[in-house]
Image (spheres, helix red, strand yellow):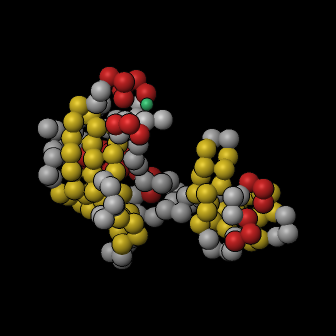
Amino acid sequence: MMIEKDHVVRIHYTLLDEAGETLESSLGHEPLALLWGHGDVVPGVEEALAGHATGDRFEVTVPPERGYGPRREDWRQRVSKKHFTNAKRLRPGMQVLLRTRDGARPVTVLKVGGSVVDVDLNHPMAGRTLRFAIEVVEVREAEPEEIAHGHVHAGAQHV
Ligand code: ZN
C-alpha cells in the first residue's frame, strides 16, 4: 500500500549528521508510528515518505528549514528550577525536557544557578542539515477515530 494522506505509517529510521555519524535510530526499538499528513514528523521526512510503500528503503537529506528550523543565537531564557523534574542533576550541556504550557520541549542547559537555570530553547537539531535513512515497515489506512483525533492509536495503549 502506498503512503498518502490519512494513512498510518510505521517506519524505522536512522538519523545521521553531516559527517555520517548516527545521532539517533529506531533500530532495536519499536518502529515510529505516524499519521501521514498531520505533521507527526518534520516536513522534509513527511514529504519524502509520500508515494513510498511497505518495504521501501531510502535516504533523504533534510535542510534546517524542512527540519527543526534555523538556530536562533538569542533564543535563551532564564527559568526557575521548579520547572525541571531533575533540577539537582542539571549540568551545562545537558539536553533536558522543560515543562511548558504547550507540553514538554527539549532544551539545552547553558548555566545552572542557585534557583534558576539558563537554557537554550533551540531544538537540539535546529540549524542542522540531517540525513535520514528510512525503512517503511507498515502502511495501512487510518481508522476514522484516528483521523478524528489526529494521531495513531496503538490498540489498548490509547490515551
Ligand atoms: Zn486518540
Front one among 145 and 73: 145
Judge whether 145 appears above or below 61 on screen. above
If the image is split into quadrants, where does the N terminus sit? top left
Q: Count the labels in the image.
A: 0
Relative placement, left or right, of 36 versus 141 is right
Residue ID at (21%, 41%): 139
Relative placement, left or right, of 56 versus 94 is left
Instruction: Note whether residue 72 is visible.
Output: no
Instruction: Point out residue 66 in the picture as x, y percentages from the top left corner.
Output: 41, 51
Residue ID at (74%, 69%): 88
Instruction: Point out residue 28 in the picture as x, y percentages from the top left corner.
Output: 30, 65
Res. 17 image quadrant: bottom left
Relative placement, left or right, of 4 versus 63 is left
Res. 52 image quadrant: top left
> For the view shown, which residue lies furthest in the front direction?
156
Res. 138 image quadrant: top left
Quadrant of the displayed image that contains ligand 1? top left
Instruction: Note whether residue 58 is visible.
Output: yes
Instruction: Point out residue 34 in the picture as x, y percentages from the top left corner.
Output: 35, 42
Residue ID at (46%, 64%): 128
Front one among 87 and 75: 87
Judge whether 36 appears above or below 45 on screen. above
Relative placement, left or right, of 56 versus 84 is left
Residue ID at (23%, 31%): 141
